Amino acid sequence: MIGKHNMDDLWKTITALRHKLHKYPELSGQEFQTKERLKSFICMNTHLKIRDNGTWFYALYEPKVNNGASPIAFRADMDALPIPETISLPYGSAKPNIAHKCGHDGHCAVLAAVAVLLEQDAAVRRPVYLIFQSAEETGQGGKTCADFVSETDISEVYAFHNLSGYPENAVMVRDRLTQCASKGLLVQFTGESAHAGTPENGRNPASALGSMALYAEKINKESSSCLCTVVSIQEGSRDFGISPGQGEVAFTLRAEADDVLENMDLTLRTQAEKLADQYGLTVSFEEFDPFPATINHPRCAEKVRRAAVKAGCFCVNMKQPWRPSEDFGWYMKIRPGAMFYVGNGTNWPMPHQPAYDFNDHILPTAAAVFLKLAESET
């Protein structure tokens, strides 16, 4: 067990844990070894109670002296991305085409450190839940954990994300909208294939597919509150003798509010149905990876700012929401809370880029903010 107040040993151990998690990444919904490594670390180094819930788990800190304040919860995500490790690291991913290119290894390491620090901080006199969540990248894990929160007396929920483009160790938090709502929408057109020499005998969906892509551009030009990104267009198989009869276009829809997202979805579906009628096609739709907007409660955002100052950190203004979505939004539908960010560095590679790796220097900063939030009595 890590010795009390031995901070050098703690951060060496936490950094080593982060590197171990990085070396053995797991995709969304498959984080079983990651979960066991984290549970083992907490069991070996703390007296926190652990509850395994299959794909995810939580550790509960119960203070010896309770001030009667309601429990608070902190969340970390455990999953990696289907991206290959292309940079040279002594702890580089041992799994082909899977790597922690979003920093969830760092998020988990921070909460593991918080688990240790809670037992060393006499000022924490309220129960604290540490939630280690699966499948954030696909939006599959957040709602399950949020449903758990709804069944408890947890009063507030907080999480953090590392963020490049801001000074190293800067703390950022926004009131209200902080990350956009999003979903994937697949539009599939079906007509009838024919010989490429007599395409008039079939119904090729190419014009409908092209029109949908252009319609997405129109949406983007006309609206500042939503974004429609074409992520895939597929038709045919490069057989030069066949005019294909099937094709699909996939979009990522992103908006500043859940209702705006749904309106954009409806607009796209309506346009696809019009095009299907125009070209004699049938059309079907499929949704993927839904994420609600992450809306910080202003009171909780202000608590983050005060916690950062008490921890000796410096805050930087975050003028615009971060466009990438976060399934932490599910928690915000259940309880007030806030997502805050810690800067990797102004020139640090952005998450999801091949050159990215979590910045170990920000581990203590994120943990310190969480700890000060736990010390708060209201």
Image (cartoon, grey):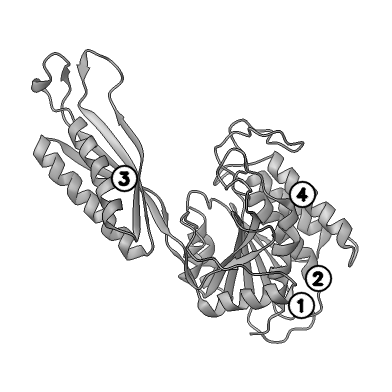
Marks 4/3: CA–CA distance: 39 Å
Quick one: label 2 or label 1, which is nearer the N terminus? 1
Compared across the picture, whether 261 is left or right of 318 comes to left
Provide the residue designation for mark 3. Answer: 286
Q: Quadrant of the C terminus?
A: bottom right
Q: Position of residue 49 (x, y in %)?
A: 73, 66
Residue 98 visible here: yes
Query: From what the image shows, is residue 114 above or below residue 9?
Result: below
Q: Nearer the viewer, residue 126 or 47?
A: 126
Q: Nearer the viewer, residue 188 or 168?
A: 168
Residue positioned 69% across, 39% down in the render: 24
Residue positioned 26% across, 31% down in the render: 247
Comparing marks 4 and 1, which lies closer to the viewer? 4
Residue type marked 1 = Pro
Quick one: label 4 or label 1, which is nearer the N terminus? 4
Provide the residue designation for mark 2. Answer: 119
Residue type marked 2 = Glu
Q: Which mark is residue 17?
A: 4
Q: Position of residue 15 (x, y in %)?
A: 78, 51
Q: Residues within 10 Å of mark 4 (few under 14, many from 20)?
A: many
- What SS does tag 1 mark? loop
Marks 4/2: CA–CA distance: 19 Å
Residue positioned 14% across, 35% down in the render: 281
Comparing marks 3 and 1, which lies closer to the viewer? 3
Quick one: label 4 or label 3, which is nearer the N terminus? 4
- What SS does tag 3 mark? strand
Provide the residue designation for mark 1. Answer: 63
